[in-house]
Image: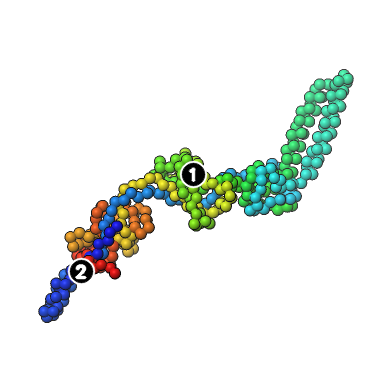
Amino acid sequence: MKTIHLIPAVACALALTGCGGGDQTRAAVDSVQVAIVDVDVAQVRAVPQTRSYTANVEAFNVNNISPSTSNRILTIKADVGDHVSAGQVLVTLDHAQADQLRINLEETERQYNRAVQLLNIGSGTQSAVDQLRTQLDAQRAQYRNVLDNTQLVSPISGVVTARNYDPGDMTGSAPVLTIGQITPAVKVVINVNETDLALVRNGMSVDVAFDAYPDEQFSGRISRVSPAVDVNTRTFPVEVQVSNSDGRLRPGMFARVNINIGTNDNVVVPDRAVLKQTGSNVKYVYVYSNGHVAFRQVQLGQRLDDAYELLGGINDGDTVVIAGQSLLNDGAAAQINTHEKK
């Protein structure tokens, strides 16, 4: 933008003081004094339209490690922050119940085998064999289930995000460990306003920034748009997937997601032209024309370095005041400062 400098128009009035006009001359000077202002020209520019959202990083997949029945914990082989692999044994529990079930199962197997032998020599019945077979199948299933729950393994590779018990505790409703899968990607779930929902779609690329890495910009992709609105916030949850092959992004990190939805041709003015009305949130600009200024309330869009995008209130080509506003009010006389700044 090219800045135009303007100067005051009080020279003629000041000349009157040299002619000895006294109080009347001074009053005349006050009545014709005008403010000296610097101005610039509002211009329409193609402004990239972005929507910014904040959220926390979440694991791409979460698995809770728990036994199917309550049992006493013998050992826990991982703690919060540890990386674990799929199939790794993480928790061992008391196996006394499994041992007893194994003994019962072995006895039932012996009884079944005897029943089969008796049936083969004509001294037994088919119903006895069938009854023992049913009992044997049920005991085998129960034993496998209890045995599987004496050693808890991780079904996924990831990082331990929660631990709720210590060795010696009886398990309850809470999981023993929670595993979060953070490679090869994590997710950030943002809440998109109803008015912007039509502008986002699956597969759209987005920019993501993290406070933990202030000098880096990450690329993300919208992987899921919720079909239902959150009735409390009137927003739609949108899932953004971010590559994390090196594992640097961790659950709980603060993220900023910027979605570029195209460009709009809007008026842009220097940030020095925009003022805030005392005691309110009203933003305004003084527009200069033919020696006077006019108060214009404006609607701000985005901040663009040292300028503002305006969504209303100013037209392309308007001359806006960027310095000297403290002496102005709506309709006040003003003169452009024509002195070049050194």
Q: Is residue 145 left or right of residue 248?
A: right
> Is residue 36 in sight in this rendering?
no
Residue for point 16% across, 76% down: 26
Give coordinates of residue 192: x percent, y percent. 44, 46
Determine contact: label 2, label 1, CB under 8 Å. no
Q: Is residue 195 left or right of residue 314?
A: right
Residue for point 81% across, 34% down: 105
> Is residue 301 in sight in this rendering?
yes
Quadrant location of the N terminus?
A: bottom left
Q: What mark, if any, has residue 221 been given in the picture?
A: 1
Q: Nearer the viewer, residue 222 or 168?
A: 222
Q: Eyeballing the image, is 158 above or below 133?
A: below
Give coordinates of residue 163: x percent, y percent. 65, 52
Where disc 2 sits, the SS reads loop
- Amino acid type, label 1: Arg
Give coordinates of residue 307: x percent, y percent. 34, 57
Q: Is residue 305 left or right of residue 312?
A: right
Where disc 1 sits, the SS reads strand
Q: What mark, if any, has residue 8 been given in the picture?
A: 2
- Amino acid type, label 2: Pro
Residue for point 41% across, 47% down: 260
Q: Nearer the viewer, residue 28 or 219?
A: 219
